[in-house]
């Protein structure tokens, strides 16, 4: 039985392997145009191939166990990797990885809790892990952009912020415009995607269902749920990251932490 399952898996990998010819085309074009991206392309697609193959076996194991502990562990692993990645993007934010991780955890956990309470999804690995992955991925991108943009804006307008602080403003009041700008910039792609979904692109969840044999009407029902949860989780995570950044941007006496903004 195990050998039969492995044979089916290997046969199923023939199409993904055949699709790598598209990457070969991209590598060839990069070489002809002297872009110098050949190695990066080969490395990226090889890494993606290995990562997805490994995660496929991991998910197969988790799905077969139907154990809540495995769901939680998989979710926390995704949040940890996402926090690290978002923190790397906002590398000049002190303790940025922890800020990003906590923000992503808060936004996705609150959203997931509401979806479970409202009985939108059952608490099973087959539903929760893919849903959590989509939310964590979006929250990671939004949180990284928010943190980086907020730090950069404050750095650019340090004189304005310091003047406001000198006049008695709190850190929140002194950086209110910078926070708003960072949040708007970070969340705009998510909202624009929601506005154009179905008109320009068919999202992954919807496409996957249709290709798997589900009717388009069933697919759009799920996609509406997905878009709602992505907007909710991204918004909570983004706002949370601004609150968690403040202690790192200011001293205990409510002055700007200069060393945070001097690094290039």
Image (cartoon, rainbow, N blue to C red):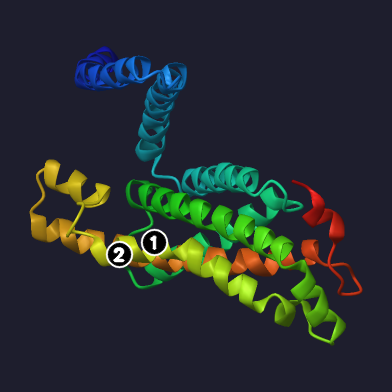
Residue displayed at 79% across by 66% down: 247
Does 46 appear above or below 58?
Answer: above
Position of 49 with respect to 260 (left or right) is left
Q: Name the image quarter holding residue 212.
A: top left
Q: Which mark is residue 133?
A: none
**Is 11 displayed left or right of 58 in the figure?**
left
Examine the rendered structure and indicate whether residue 121 appears above or below residue 212.
Answer: below
Q: Residues within 10 Å of mark 1 (few under 14, many from 20)?
A: some
The residue beneath circle 2 is 194
Q: Position of residue 203 (x, y in %)?
A: 25, 51
> Where residue 102 appears, x then y in whole percent?
64, 58
Quadrant where the N terminus sits is top left
| Residue occupying the point 40% across, 60% down | 189
Left or right of 36 in this view: 183: right
Asked whether the residues under the numbered discs 2 and 1 touch, taking CB atoms below 8 Å apart as contact, a structural biologist would say yes
Q: Residue furthest bottom?
A: 168
The answer, for residue 1, to whether it is visible in the render is no
Residue 6, x across and y down, in percent: 28, 16
Residue 190: mark in rendering: 1
Residue situated in front as seen by the camera: 111 or 57: 111
Position in image of residue 220 (x %, y %): 17, 60
């Amino acid at each position: 039985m195990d050998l039969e399952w492995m044979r089916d898996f290997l046969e199923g990998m023939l199409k993904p392997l055949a699709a790598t010819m598209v990457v070969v085309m991209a590598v060839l074009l990069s070489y002809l145009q002297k872009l110098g991206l050949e190695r990066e392309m080969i490395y990226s697609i090889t890494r993606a191939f290995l990562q997805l193959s490994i995660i496929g076996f991991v998910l197969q194991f988790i799905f077969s166990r139907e154990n809540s502990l495995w769901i939680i562990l998989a979710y926390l692993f995704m949040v940890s990797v996402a926090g690290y990645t978002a923190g790397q993007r906002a590398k000049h934010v002190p303790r940025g990885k922890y800020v990003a991780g906590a923000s992503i955890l808060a936004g996705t956990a609150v959203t997931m809790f509401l979806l479970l309470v409202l009985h939108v999804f059952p608490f099973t690995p087959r539903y929760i892990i893919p849903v959590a992955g989509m939310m964590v991925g979006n929250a990671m991108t939004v949180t990284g952009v928010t943190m980086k943009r907020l730090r950069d804006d404050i750095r650019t307008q340090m004189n304005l912020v310091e003047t406001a602080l000198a006049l008695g403003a709190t850190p929140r009041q002194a950086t209110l415009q910078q926070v708003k700008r960072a949040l708007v910039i970070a969340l705009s792609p998510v909202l624009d995607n929601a506005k154009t979904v179905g008109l320009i692109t068919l999202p992954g969840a919807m496409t996957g269902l249709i290709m798997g044999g589900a009717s388009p009407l069933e697919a759009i029902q799920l996609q509406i749920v997905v878009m709602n949860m992505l907007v909710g989780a991204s918004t909570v995570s983004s706002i949370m990251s601004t609150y968690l950044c403040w202690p790192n941007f200011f001293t205990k006496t409510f002055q700007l932490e200069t060393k945070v903004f001097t690094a290039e």
